[in-house]
Image (cartoon, rainbow, N blue to C red):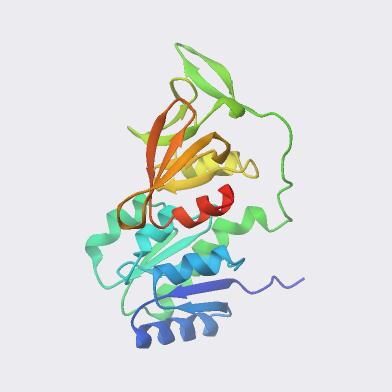
Amino acid sequence: MTAPPLRALVAEDEPYNLRRLARLLREQGCEVVAELEDGDAVMEWLDHGGEADALFLDIQMPGLTGLEVAGALPRNLPVVFVTAYSEHAVRAFEQEAVDYLLKPVTAERLARTLDRVRAHRAPREDGPVPKPAGPFRYAVKAGEGLVFLDLARTTHFTYEEDAVWAHAGGRFRTLWKSLSEAEEALEGRGLVRGHRHLLLRPEAVVGVRAGEFGRLLVRLAGDQELEVSRGAAPQLKKRLGL
């Protein structure tokens, strides 16, 4: 049985580069599901139910940058950054990008990138992941052993000091090595990205107020206040019914 074509979203503020990358993707057998000109349009498209197998994002765009969009994604969605500036490479891979393409993109280089994207999504192609239900516990380090914490008592997770930390009436080091790994383990549990180093449980939010430049300040159980990025704010507001 032939595999369905890979669905790609392209976001680029330069019309020529946008059309060219979309054409190269189609020539490689991809279905280009959206051609957008800025990061705000990407978030709006996703918030309205748009679905893609990979996002090809220019890093420097009006409004939300490609890096800000990637940091606000609500799920583990493969991202490929496309830019003319090689100095952004380190930040791109800090966002756990599948790949990083320098302009002008060539067909040969794009083919290698698509191989990486397909390898990234291969484990999920056998069928949808069932949505879990009921109580859930996860392991954290305690001395030389482990203890288990209830997700229902957890307000959020942060990535700091090369580790994922759970905040549940205290700060506990988990076994996950990245927030993407935590998201995968907690898929279907309703957590939302606050920014590239923050994963929130919306049920723990007890208050919100507007921050600067479109950001959102959320107050959690325990009276802690955290900042949510401009890119992530719409998704969290949606989950909170705002």
Residue 135 location (% of width, % of height): 70, 29
**Farthest residue, direction right:** 1
Q: Is residue 98 left or right of residue 191?
A: left
Residue 89 location (% of width, % of height): 29, 59
Question: Front-most of 96 and 233?
Answer: 233
The N terminus sits in image quarter: bottom right
Question: Front-most of 166 and 109?
Answer: 166
Residue 194 location (% of width, % of height): 44, 46
Q: Quadrant of residue 99?
A: bottom left
Q: Residue at x 52, y 63 (%)?
A: 117
Q: Does residue 86 show up?
A: yes
Q: Residue at x 71, y 49 (%)?
A: 129
- In the figure, 113 relative to 210: above or below? below
Q: Quadrant of residue 158?
A: top left
- In the figure, 233 relative to 191: above or below? below
Question: Front-most of 163 and 219?
Answer: 219
Give the total number of marks visible in the rendering: 0
Q: Does residue 112 show up?
A: no
Q: Is residue 242 left or right of residue 81?
A: right
Residue 174 location (% of width, % of height): 48, 27
Q: Residue at x 65, y 44 (%)?
A: 188
Q: Quadrant of residue 48?
A: bottom right
Q: Is residue 163 left or right of residue 76?
A: left
